[in-house]
Amino acid sequence: MNTPILPTCPKCKQTDQVQKVTSIYGLNTKEWYETRSSTDADGHTHHYREKHEAHTQLGLRLKPPQQPTSPFHPGLWYGIGVFIVIFVCSMLFPLLLVPLSFIVPMLGLTTFLPEVSGVPTWVIPVVVIGGGTLCVSVVIIGLLVWAGVKVKQRFDRDLANYKSKKAIFERDDLPRWQRAKDRWDQLYFCMRDETVFIPSENKAVSVEHMEKYLYDPLFRN
């Protein structure tokens, strides 16, 4: 079997302590999954796998560039907020019917009273309580409409901000990380000098400057 020829370290001009960074990182990193269980409100049990990583000191120093996180779409949080508002309103709506519980007894008490100017006495409490309930309902509906308009305006701003960040992420951040990750895959590490290098560039840098070496084109010269 032919032994692969390792590249020469640009600093010490030797090959005996040179290894591929991806290989060193794999040997100094341990990954495993743990299965966890949770029970929801309906008593159903759900299982999910959780990934864990452990690194040696060298493994941490040679970690690949961290993938940037995509901007979070605001629709999910607004959807949760709308669900909560609807749920709360459905719980509070029966309270608007409470005044009706006072109408029936008052009707029973006022049937024995004489009519005033041709108007049955039971009409008065009905008008007062019913009118009050109607006014409160109109005010609540008006507040909900006003709040809905404000939330819609805020959502439009957040959505526009999300689209702007998403465009920057896809145009700049993600390709920049992909280029750095491709360079990381080409790296070699010299244990003698504790330097990293890409053979085709013939330049070695210390491990502490690895990230800058991967991302900054000016640093490679």
Image (cartoon, grey):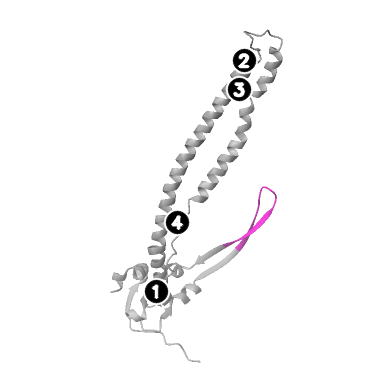
Mark toward the viewer: 3 or 1: 3
Query: Where is residue 97 drawn, in percent x and y?
Result: 63, 27
Q: Residues within 10 Å of mark 3 (few under 14, many from 20)?
A: some
Disc assigned to residue 71: 4
Does dot 1 land on a helix, a strand or a loop?
helix
Does dot 4 land on a helix, a strand or a loop?
loop
Q: Tell me the CA gap for discs 3 and 2.
A: 10 Å
The residue lying toward the viewer, choosing from 19 and 43, is 43
Sequence-first tag of 4 and 1 = 4
Residue span colored magenta:
34-50
Q: Residue at x 62, y 60 (%)?
A: 48
The residue that disc 1 covers is: 183
Residue found at the far front of this picture: 118
The residue that disc 2 covers is: 124
The residue that disc 3 covers is: 130
Does dot 3 land on a helix, a strand or a loop?
helix
